Amino acid sequence: MTTDQIIPAAIIIVVLILVVVGVSRAVMRRRGQNEDAFGAGGTSKVPLGTEGVAKTVLDPSGVVLVVGEQWTATSQDGAQIAPGVRVHVVGQDGLTLIVAADSNPDQLGE
């Protein structure tokens, strides 16, 4: 191979490597078929009775922290639940938890 052939061959090899790397990265980022069916951490179900804490006002919907993950939640009876109030899971509708404020009015410090 002469010097006139080495430079174009090197450019072609670099371009091919970049294409292969780009395609492989795109394949790795691709979402799985059922990925939307799972919440954070790969779980789609939270056991009834699991305790957590309201992170935002639930009026009647908001965000709670349960099993170390933030979930969208709705209060069971539509009542407002303030941030920091302990809650427990009484049901689940898809990825939305249905929660009730604990009967003990203690709040968690934030």
Image: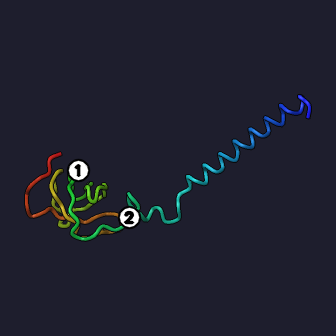
Q: In this view, does 109 lie above or below 101?
A: above
Query: Which residue is drawn at the image coordinates 32% and 69% (left, top)?
Result: 93
> Image quadrant for the C terminus?
top left
Q: Earlier in the sequence, mark 2 or mark 1?
A: 2
Query: Which residue is drawn at the image coordinates 55% and 52% (left, top)?
Result: 29
Q: Which amino acid does label 2 sit on?
A: Thr
Task: Pinpoint residue 54: horizontal percent, then vertical percent.
Answer: 21, 54
Q: Name the residue under label 2.
A: 43
Tag 2: Cα neighbours inside 10 Å, few (<14), some, or many (≥20)?
Answer: few
Tell me the CA gap for discs 2 and 1: 22 Å
Task: Pinpoint residue 86: horizontal percent, then vertical percent.
Answer: 16, 58
Q: Which of marks 2 and 1 is in front?
A: 2
Quarter of image, res 87 = bottom left
Furthest residue toward top? 3
Q: In this view, does 68 lie above or below 7?
A: below
Quarter of image, res 43 = bottom left
Query: Which residue is drawn at the image coordinates 8% and 55% (left, top)?
Result: 106
- Position of 105 with respect to 69 (left or right) is left
Q: Name the residue under label 1.
A: 56
